[in-house]
Amino acid sequence: MPSDELSVLPVPNLDKAPERYDNEIDELDANCQQLARDFLRETPAVRDQSLAQLRDWIAKHPNIKRCRTDARFLLRFLRTKKYSFINASQMLERYLACRVVHPHWFQRLDIEDREMCDLVEAGFLYPLLEKDDRGRTVIFGDAGTLNPKQFTIGHGSRMHMLVGETLYDDASVQCAGFVLIYDLSGITMGMLGLVTLNDIRDLATYLNNAVPMRIQELHFVNTPSLALKIANYTLAVINEKLRNRIMCHRTWEDLHKKIDKRLIPQEYGGVHPKADHIAAFKQRCHVYRKPMLALDDMDFEVTRDLDYCKKSVVGEIETGPVGSFRKLQLD
């Protein structure tokens, strides 16, 4: 991840139908141009037409009161859904609804909040300094830093959103996607006790339907047996595409067979010390602070017929092939 100059980005316009739209976008490098063309079906004409269509939909949507309409924001959803207007608009709608239904998970993403800053500095979750050889952004998490006496599942969710919201507008992230690595060696019974089945269901619903990110791989290292049981329950409520991208590893050496070890923190076999990765991310949080806080001012009216976030996924489980999915095994 390239370092940013410490200049705070401006607050985005939240007028759902502004007189003039912000069409500024990042220029794609050669790798992302090929990914956008070959895998996302993106051309300049398709991009412009899709942005216009999504903006018109936002302007006419009775439940959307205030929302970002700048190109960088809307491309999160269009690129995630490969320019399917129906799927992209549904994801945006659910994203806005989730922010209303679960504010304790998705709002107050503030690096100057003492609890958030503590988790950032502890290294609970942060993007790594360099992308992998496929241009994917790598995110590293250390579950053992979440003190159950101080933090809740809400803090963990907000940290994931904090990381995500500093990256979602990045064109390279939108095109190449993410790789996530979690160190579970420090996880305790107290931490596992923070998570309820309802939390898993709600988070899975969000992950399946509302998260504007392209997760390419998800790696768990040093996974204790109890956590593996919870992970296998979680598999039942996430979509098959993501389910097939999850891998568990007994050791860091096993992970190194899948991930270039030079990318990860020095303490785990990489090049740059953990403190360097965290410092760069903390700086990025300050750069994006105002745009992230402005997200809390978006306004969406959740009504019974549109309340996607309160819908239980139990029905999907009961009607689906429960038990037939590939269970997680340690490499």
Image (cartoon, grey):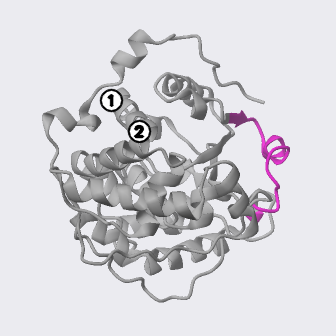
Where's the C terminus, which quadrant? Answer: top right
At label 1, which amino acid type do we have?
Answer: Asn
Residue at the (23%, 65%) spot, across then down: 16
Residue in the image at 75% along x and 63% along y: 31
Amino acid beneath label 2: Asn
Q: Quadrant of residue 323?
A: top right
Residue 302, percent from left and from top = 17, 44
Residue, disc 1: 198
Q: Where does the image place residue 21, in percent across and percent down from the top left?
A: 34, 74
Provide the residue designation for mark 2. Answer: 209
In this rendering, the answer to whether 290 lies above or below 192 is: below
In terms of secondary structure, where does tag 2 sit? helix
The correct choice, above or below, for 153 with respect to 201 in the image is: below
| Residue 194: % across, % down | 38, 38
The span picked out in magenta is: 247-266
Based on the displayed image, in which of its 4 quarters is residue 271 positioned? bottom right
Q: Does 6 sit left or right of 108 as displayed?
A: right
Q: Mark 1 or mark 2: which is in front?
A: 2
Q: Specify few, some or many for label 1: CA neighbours under 10 Å numbering under 14, 14-19, or 20 or more.
A: few
Q: Residue at x 82, y 40 (%)?
A: 254
Residue 171 placement (x, y as % from top left): 58, 66
Mark 1, secondary structure of its residue: helix
